Amino acid sequence: MSALLLIEQVLNGLQFGVMLFLMAAGLTLVFGVMGLINLAHGSLYMVGAFAAAAVAAATGSFLLALAASLTAAALAGALVELAVIRRLYDRDHLDQVLATFALILIFSEGTRWLFGSFPLYLDIPDYLSGPVTLPGGIRYPLYRLALIVIGLLVAAGLFLLIARTRLGMRIRAGQSDREMIAALGVNISALYTMVFALGAALAGLAGALVGAIQSVQVGMGEPVLILAFVVIVIGGIGSVRGALIGALLVGLTDTLGGALLPSFFSLFMDPASATSVGSALASMLIYILMAGVLVVRPSGLFGRV
Amino acid sequence: MTEPVLEIRDIRKAFGALKASDGISLDLREGEIHALIGPNGAGKSTLIQQIAGGLRPDSGTVHFLGEDVTALPAAARARMGLARTFQISSLAMEHTVLQNLVLGALGARGGVFRFFRPVMKDGALLEAAREAMAAVGLEELARTRVADLSHGQRRQLEVAVALVLKPRAFLMDEPMAGLGLEGSRQMTRFLDGLRAEAPILLVEHDMDAVFALADRISVLVYGRVIATGTPREIRADSEVRRAYLGEEDMA
Amino acid sequence: MSREAVLNGVIALGLLAVPLWAWAADEPFVITLATRVAILALAGVGLNIALGLGGLVSFGHAAFFGIGGYAMGILASHAQSYEPLMEWPVLIEGTRSMPVIWLVAVVASALAALVIGALSLRTSGVYFIMITLAFAQMLYYFTISWPAYGGEDGLSIYLRNSFPGLNTLDPIQFFAICYAILLAALFFTARLAKSPFGLALAAARQNAARVEAVGIRPYRVRLVAFVISAALTGLAGALFADLNRFVSPAMFGWNISGEIMVLVILGGVARLFGPVAGAALFILLENVLGGISEYWQVFLGLLLLGVVLFARGGLVGLIAGREATHD
């Protein structure tokens, strides 16, 4: 494999990684602050994608579509938090799993009801389509490059938010000591709704951004959700930094594994079986990575014991 | 002189900058009650954890029955005959008194991985459980769920589960905690008789009980044993008075 | 007899009576539905050992359901094509014999559970949930990308496998097989819950430190429970594949894990017959609500939400009342 192709795959891995980070950040924040496992996070990703596709179809504006994805997912998140999620904070994890599983069913089938079973398409806007030539003569799709940049900007913004703002201070306090923030007179239920809506907005944004390179359809959220779980298991549940490192690791491992393993096996196998062995192994690579991290650090790379 | 049943040699454990155990050595000999006292935050719980096997020391060793058990997990130490009671009652809350004791008897006997015979009809286990129940006077509550027991009854059950293990040594973390005057007196009388079965390493805040029961007392302050001796010696020790009692006179 | 025991009897007889009636009335579709109930109940009985007795919230039991399914698919497809699975170093041929397939399904899912459990049980709580889910997803993607056994399209088996002395293509006879296995599994689980192992497992759920302090390692007890639980769910997977004469990666899907868990919860966690009641309710809802609306899962979701938020004992709990102590 040539160096150019390799760089392209690394960029693909980065792009995949930052999008996973947008998903994983919300999950890990919600777990860190509220102690809640939310299976329906993938539904918020889907809500963002559908909102974007619907608004793009109506207005033709990609930026409005992105704004719609953020707004719709944040609203859906806040609504779900107020109606269901806040009854689950004091429950055990089994109840949280079941109730949020129920939410998946409601969201998925409800969306199918509204939009039908056929996938929608969200087009990349003209000003972001086509390839761009990077230093070193690498031609790379501009849109994917934009995803990397947006993802990194959002990550930086999130870190600033947590490090510098009042909301961030409360989030950090909530992660280390829930009773203390109550003692400080912070309105906890408003804080929880806000954190949940923030996580939802990030997931919705990811759904819209990825929706433009894949199709927008019911069930698109859950595979990403499970990958985001792998990310935060690797990074350590509750740690935003861990989520970023984990997401990049998973993104790169998955992309590079898929690209490199088949050619690696073709060094000593016939092409057909090299492709099948290579791609089968590549499909399991991130889970093997997760297993490896678990053996060495059961609570993840940045997890608190 | 016979070898001590339990021997802790130069145990060190730090959490960041905090030295919870700063070179602790002590031992427990056959037939004695060795009390471990010290102000809050002295590192008693950390030490108990390391002896029981819940925490690995950074350095130093724990010997039990002449064997180095420093690397063994808690369950293995329990199987060798090291029975502990917890500071906060630690029982299977949905199970009955009898079930908790049968579980103890099962742990002591072994044979957990049997899947077909009803455990609550196993004569040998039931007998061991009943014996321990009688020893602490809980017979009438055999079928009561732990969740429905009073605090004092849970403390008794906690000791009974240790007893059912037929241990070679007891490790007791504040068995009197929250018992009230009469309860403490009963427990004191009970532990007094228990030392004949197996020696007791006793962590306790109730000084009346400690000075009534202990053959030896060790005083732990800031992760160090500052004195070990008979109750009389400890009462007279000037360093103990200074560090632990803050120069207060001891009644 | 306690109220729960009476209810259990009613459920068991009901699950037998419905297909017998359907047989007499010549309604093979109803027999097939009853067979689905029995098979899903078996999968739930398996999960309930980990979830109900052991408190291990496995969201990855589809892994074992799928492995059981593929054990059937792979063995039967080789028998179908007369190509041996392996010629060297020993000759292994496919088979159509159900008992052999079941054995392979049980052993394969138990082995997988040993590995997955050994890794996942190093953690607990949310980690355990996510990791079990992730490992099931790994197998899902593996079966999709492994072309030898149909890849994404799965494997079709033209004839149902055979059982000595029975005609397995007759719906009522195949139902009888599944029902008998379900009853055997229920009997085994009832004994298990009262056994020394069951006591230790239930105690480890309530208080791991206590179990450890009496000399029993909770990790080992949980691992063995996870393996037994997976083996039963794997067996259910083999039967499910035989019912449909088809296996595909969908058997490994996360929603299968969710559905097995949901039927356990709908029926009542840690109740012996909870999974049976839950499976019956699930299939009933699927067919009644599914007849009314294509989007019946919205209502399933709402119902599940209601059960979780307001009726935690599930169906058996609702009818039989609070759980009695186990002795």
Image: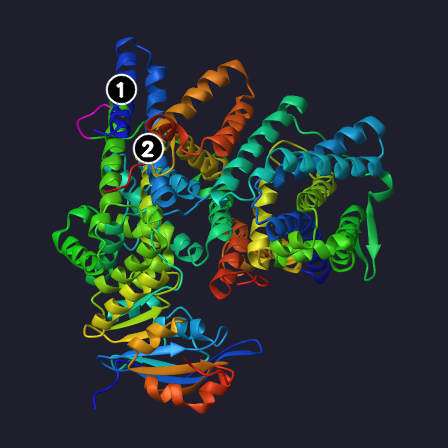
Q: Position of residue C194 (x, y in %)?
A: 23, 44
Q: Nearer the viewer, residue B93 or A287?
A: B93
Host chain of mark 1: C
Host chain of mark 2: C
Compared across the picture, whether A253 is left or right of C226 comes to right
Q: Please give the residue where the numbered disc 2 appears in the rendered image.
A: C239
The reply to whether the magenta stretch includes residue C170 is yes
Q: Magenta region: which residues?
A: C164-171
Query: What main secondary structure does the magenta stretch of the protein show?
Result: loop
Q: Indicate the secondary structure of the residue bearing disc 2.
A: helix
Q: Nearer the viewer, residue B222 or A95?
A: B222
The reply to whether the magenta stretch includes residue A87 is no
Compared across the picture, whether A99 is left or right of B86 comes to right
Vertical position of residue C33 compared to residue B2: above or below: above
From this viewpoint, which residue is outermost toward the top? C25
Q: Please give the residue where the numbered disc 1 appears in the rendered image.
A: C172
Q: Position of residue B174 (x, y in %)?
A: 37, 68
Compared across the picture, whether A255 is left or right of B226 comes to right
Residue in the picture at 62% in, 31% down = A218
